[in-house]
Image: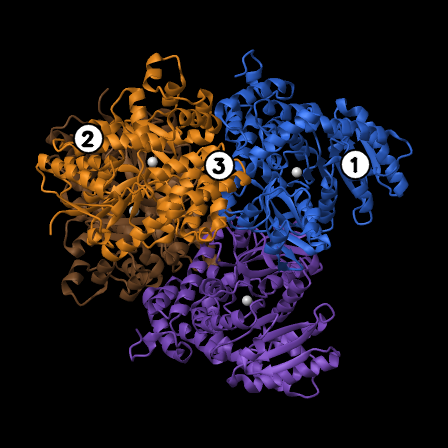
Chain colours: A blue, B orange, C brown, D purple
Amino acid sequence: MKGLKIVTIGGGSSYTPELVEGFIKRYKELPIRELWLVDIPDGKEKLEIVGELARRMVEKAGVPMAIHLTLNRREALKDADFVTTQIRVGLLDARAKDERIPLKFGVIGQETNGPGGLFKALRTVPVILDICKDIEELCPDAWLINFSNPAGLNTEAVLRYSNIRKVVGLCNLPIGMRMNVAELLNINVDRVHIDFAGLNHMVFGLNVYVDGIKVTDKVIDKMTSGEQTETVKNIPDFQWEPEFIRALGFLPCPYHRYYYQTSVMLEDQVEAYKKNGTRAEVVKKLEAELFELYKDPNLDVKPPQLEKRGGAYYSDAACNLIYSIYNDKRDIQTVNVRNNGAISGIPEDSAVEVNCVITKEGPKPIAVGNLPVPVRGLVQQIKSFERTAAEAAVTGDYHKALLAMTINPLVPSDAIAKQILDEMLEAHKDYLPQFKCLESADAK
Amino acid sequence: MKGLKIVTIGGGSSYTPELVEGFIKRYKELPIRELWLVDIPDGKEKLEIVGELARRMVEKAGVPMAIHLTLNRREALKDADFVTTQIRVGLLDARAKDERIPLKFGVIGQETNGPGGLFKALRTVPVILDICKDIEELCPDAWLINFSNPAGLNTEAVLRYSNIRKVVGLCNLPIGMRMNVAELLNINVDRVHIDFAGLNHMVFGLNVYVDGIKVTDKVIDKMTSGEQTETVKNIPDFQWEPEFIRALGFLPCPYHRYYYQTSVMLEDQVEAYKKNGTRAEVVKKLEAELFELYKDPNLDVKPPQLEKRGGAYYSDAACNLIYSIYNDKRDIQTVNVRNNGAISGIPEDSAVEVNCVITKEGPKPIAVGNLPVPVRGLVQQIKSFERTAAEAAVTGDYHKALLAMTINPLVPSDAIAKQILDEMLEAHKDYLPQFKCLESADAK
Amino acid sequence: MKGLKIVTIGGGSSYTPELVEGFIKRYKELPIRELWLVDIPDGKEKLEIVGELARRMVEKAGVPMAIHLTLNRREALKDADFVTTQIRVGLLDARAKDERIPLKFGVIGQETNGPGGLFKALRTVPVILDICKDIEELCPDAWLINFSNPAGLNTEAVLRYSNIRKVVGLCNLPIGMRMNVAELLNINVDRVHIDFAGLNHMVFGLNVYVDGIKVTDKVIDKMTSGEQTETVKNIPDFQWEPEFIRALGFLPCPYHRYYYQTSVMLEDQVEAYKKNGTRAEVVKKLEAELFELYKDPNLDVKPPQLEKRGGAYYSDAACNLIYSIYNDKRDIQTVNVRNNGAISGIPEDSAVEVNCVITKEGPKPIAVGNLPVPVRGLVQQIKSFERTAAEAAVTGDYHKALLAMTINPLVPSDAIAKQILDEMLEAHKDYLPQFKCLESADAK
Amino acid sequence: MKGLKIVTIGGGSSYTPELVEGFIKRYKELPIRELWLVDIPDGKEKLEIVGELARRMVEKAGVPMAIHLTLNRREALKDADFVTTQIRVGLLDARAKDERIPLKFGVIGQETNGPGGLFKALRTVPVILDICKDIEELCPDAWLINFSNPAGLNTEAVLRYSNIRKVVGLCNLPIGMRMNVAELLNINVDRVHIDFAGLNHMVFGLNVYVDGIKVTDKVIDKMTSGEQTETVKNIPDFQWEPEFIRALGFLPCPYHRYYYQTSVMLEDQVEAYKKNGTRAEVVKKLEAELFELYKDPNLDVKPPQLEKRGGAYYSDAACNLIYSIYNDKRDIQTVNVRNNGAISGIPEDSAVEVNCVITKEGPKPIAVGNLPVPVRGLVQQIKSFERTAAEAAVTGDYHKALLAMTINPLVPSDAIAKQILDEMLEAHKDYLPQFKCLESADAK
Ligand SMILES: [Mn+2]
Ligand SMILES: [Mn+2]
Ligand SMILES: [Mn+2]
Ligand SMILES: [Mn+2]
């Protein structure tokens, strides 16, 4: 049977049209025979709305890609070539809690590497590992392309607690950073290459090249010199202390603001919350609007409104990765994979986010060696958090969860950690069956 | 010439009587021929007061140890066997600034691993390296025993920026932790052994043994179970969230409260400051009282008031170390030395605080291997800070100093880091000749 | 019940009187209640001869140490405090084959790290692992002190394939090297300290100290300057190329001659074999003579003839180790233990031979860091061999055994490796039940 | 000025026509403006013969590539974009000694990683480092592409003893191994991908893929099953013990036969020497014939006879590498570069031979992690040799040279090492000005 079978778990997501568009665009070199969109019963309605739109898009494009909609994951997975996961356990309501509860205690929720991310992981990791078991049985040669957050932590958990090795975690930050640099230099993004290394949402752009020439210092000069008015226009959201960026000497990622500007970010979040509620609540409204659009039977392309949604390029990154694996493209992409020694000081079997050359055999990480001294510690600290959180997610051990919460750099004390933890465990208990401590009245 | 020559730089310190007492007690097995107390011109008066007391102590004890007082460091160092350093560049006034300025910006000063510690390092490291140059020339076989803070960072700087390899950094925390455990278990401290590993003021007690049997869990149970009233009595200052300590599974050191209880510690410090001013100011008063006592020509022993001073056991630790090196004692002490691979993931040539067997050839670190996952990150982060700070101290590079300040876990943002840095550079400029940026009007 | 229970597996060995003497000498500080000598049915006669001698020795010394003789290992192990193993699976006849068969193919047998050692390991490791299972069940807190060869490889196997962690492998080379240096310098051995590091029979004396002063160069000068006739007298067996030792700059162990003088050693062995047969055959004769002596009912001390036997100080090393563990002596001994990071570049969970401080909690390895560049490779090569051989011993996998044989530095080709392997597998098949390939007619 | 300037040092080599052909073939995408062929006065005649042929080739091809011939290296290097080195210090006569002298002592010469290679390094490294100094001054942005042997050791020396970081060492073995596999499977070489890792002439093919599917076991089956007559035809030179290759489970390189079949290789060499003299002498004859051909003014293409010369694909590999760097091709090539952590356990700043993705910023090594246990030791041993030899080459230290010779796995004893060393030092003394020991009469 010719052509690829692709399975998208969490297929009812509002992002799916971007993914479908990406596949259609690449169809000639990425001949997908079947695209299975899988969701859970609670997501049936959305799955159908999105699925119908996908069918209209495919038909309009005139490509022979069959769209299957199902609530039966195992049926879908049989003999798949690629499995993508874009799940959100507990939906946006859970995310709202991830953000709101920490904030109540004066702590940033931060849904990926922060306290919110811990709970997102506690809910998500068991589901991902469950999918891994199905993959092992039903499509052992498939690649698992995960873009559910926390993408780095999820990859760590798969590498450490499943038998699946063909796993890649995806994020749109690195491509976003490249685009920003291109915009800043006013050149085409293809000419910009960046040596990325670190962890998911904790990645640094260590060297920047244009046409093979190192221009890191020049880029930093441009970024930090407020005089040039056009520069400022190009990077309206540059909110770093310029001297700090000069001192660092390479590019932080936007999420680094949580760690290098904790107090500022907290104030912003409190302010934003007062105005609009949590980001989850904002997104919920946006999503409802998107689904209204998707229902329109005349709509047969990805609506432009989706690009404003925030996760732009995520699906594109997934399509690109699948495309390069399938075609043995050997381009360089920045993804989350088994370290394999690429970053010294991080275990070989831990997940890292680094530049990889994408081959038919999968992404192969490019060796980075030691990270620069000043950032080595922070990267290790997030890795300590990720590993402890993954262990808590798998074991349901209250103390491991407390440890993960306390060592998180955003959490200001062990006592506050315990308060947040206890309240969040209670709030999310329907999605945390592994935590036996929740069964009795007392949360411990 | 028989007997040892010991040189104490910063000999006018209020701690010196403890050191002298320690040497007297051990005289039989540690025959010190000459003890040279060295100080700078500004410390001449104190040096004389302390020196006279030392002479009375020695005479009373009837040991033939000559006490020399001098402002000429090079004269003193000639052919020394051991050099101890207990210097405080800028005296307590500088420390007051180290504490007060950060607090103004809502940040803990923390005079060793925090923003205050950065400035203590910027002032102290060049002086220590200067001493190293003299040692290299005048007494190349001498051991340098440093108990000036930040003791870990200073050791790092000596290892990285001088040719001296016979260097040990000292702290009284590990012995204090052992004493606490002994008190908790109500047994003699000699029966308690703890596997210590980490960095200075960032050291963990990984395993606790009594008579060779591992009792870590039992100790943690005792520490965290509030029911036993006598336990509570024994550890009045136990201020950890008990579940966190259970989750950790080993002993943090008191300074870990700065990192695992940042918010609480900050409140405490603000409160204490309002009541008593900085700790430096409190200590200054204590010191003045001590020197009043020392002046008394009838005083010929270490006055008991000194023990309340705070740094108890520091001098005793120094005496003990010198004693064990001289006598090839092969006991285990916890000191700051070249890692040499003892802690995996930290460079071989960096300083760590670990258990060492103390031989005539010096302290030899016992291999620890990898630190436990949950604390690996924090230890690395402080090492990132120490190395960056040491580099700033040596180079006088403004950006390195800003980097060190910003990556410090106690500092909440890059912008605040810059504000604190700029104000502190200005405040301490007399002691920071290496910072060329201070020469011009503008602090950068 | 007061006093220690010690179990010696392979108790019928001719070395046992040295062990018994060692225990008697230390009785005051090492109060052994019961010494169990265990052997297999084939060794019953020797066990009884040795056992009776032991009883006479104990009686003569007047110490209340009960000597138990048994063929029931499990009965003996119950609640033991220390278990020593001095087994020789297949006895000296097997060793004769280990030496003779390789020699037939022009290859040194070398019964520890060479082709002979591979077969010694294939026979011994399964028995040691079996003992470990019994220890786990019957005396889980006991220390396993192994001096069966290959001592390093056996320790590796215990660490990697059993649950026992309280294991130490012993060798008499390091103490022998210290004694040689003392003799060379004509001083008491207690004044000599050597930093040992490497693997069993692959250990280097990196630094030599006398009274804490480094004298490595001086020792090497003495060793290599043939002019001084008295030196030559002191080291009649110095057979190194002097310039090589000067180039090396530290001390090789006697077994290094197999690797740095392969051709010479081979000629020696061929020569010796022609004259006296294998070393095993020589030893067999010596042993028979010893047992004749042991039978004498008037003999009630260790006969002086035993010291000529070759393994002198092995039992003494065992007594010393037990003594230091029991008394928390904190002296430094060179033993085979879990690396724990002591030697960089060797896995934490592999066995190494390094200086350890001996505490009640067991031997704690002193951190060495990186080995000197010129010897790093050879040490790694023997570790490759040890790990591959241990895997072959546990799995009975023909190909792993062939791989171990081929990568051994003494074996000159893959084809010869196969010939030796096939002949030895056949010759030892009674002791290699794990090799299923031996069941069929064809040896593969 | 448009187009590239390429400088080939050792331009008078018989290989140059292949290089010129490679450049001509790629001219469209690799527009070389000037190709400078540099040689030393002794090579003037050959340089002119080869240079004239190059000019005829360029003219015939109709590409505007200027061929410059010079004995003035510094003039040539000015503003070069790429510098290739194919030097042979002492010419084939020196190589003949490298091979003949060891053989006299019953030792394989092996001109890259063996005793011969040591001397090749002692002669070559100083010249390469000299070239590096010129590059630093005259064309600091140029890439140094070295294919002089020992290519790995030379790269190590450049990384460790010069300031040049844009250096790549080249070998034709990896491409040859891929071709062999392709031939064995009877498929196009482009479909074969191999994960290579190790050192130069010590590289392993860890995984073999066809179209992205791992087929290592299948390839090994084919290689080792003698039954299939066509297989045997395909690999006439398969001379491994089949069971060994099965045990290994991945591909050794042809040079591994020196280490895994030392005795066989030695016999072969002795045999071959008796018949034809050294390989150097054979090659010398071949070269003379080639130069006769080159002189023919009608010859304007690379003569087919050159392919039989042995080093086929070397120049092609160089062209390919330059082409991929210039065009940011991002294909995977196997080259010698700074390890950068790619192979765990080898220092970051040492040279390794690994798969790299070739970008405009240079080759970036793909992370391998730990090598398989059985080969880890041998790789480390050659790295020990390379580093010690490089140090000897730079310092001219007799003892370092002796150490390198003795630790080489092909050398059977320290005494023989010294004999070979002393004789070779004397034989090559004209090319070893750094060895001060050669100045006096006595060779030490
Ligand atoms: Mn992301
Ligand atoms: Mn301290
Ligand atoms: Mn031994
Ligand atoms: Mn080659």
Instruction: Kindly identify which chain the residue marked by label 2 belongs to.
Output: B
x and y percent of residue D257 in the render? 50, 62
Tell me the subunit letter for badge 3: B
- Vertical placement of residue C126 versus A281, above or below: below
Q: Is mark 1 within 8 Å of ligand 1?
A: no
Q: Are marks 1 and 2 in contact (CB under 8 Å)?
A: no
Q: What is the C-alpha distance between the residues marked 1 and 2?
A: 78 Å
Label placed on residue B293: 2
- Residue pushed farthest top? A441
Instruction: For marks 2 and 3, give the one nearer the viewer.
Output: 2
Q: Nearer the viewer, mark 1 or mark 2?
A: 2
Instruction: Give the residue drawn at x 24%, y 24%.
Output: B188
Classify residue B255 as left or right of residue A103.
left
Query: Mark 1 to mark 3: distance in Å?
Result: 38 Å
Q: Which mark is residue A306?
A: 1
Q: Secondary structure at mark 3?
A: loop
Residues packed near mark 3 inside 10 Å, few (<14), some (14 to 19) or many (20 plus): many
Q: Read off the residue under disc 3.
A: B409
| Left or right: where D381 falls relative to C269 | right
Decide which of C102, B293 is in the foreground and name it: B293
Relative to residue C437, is residue A136 drawn left or right? Answer: right
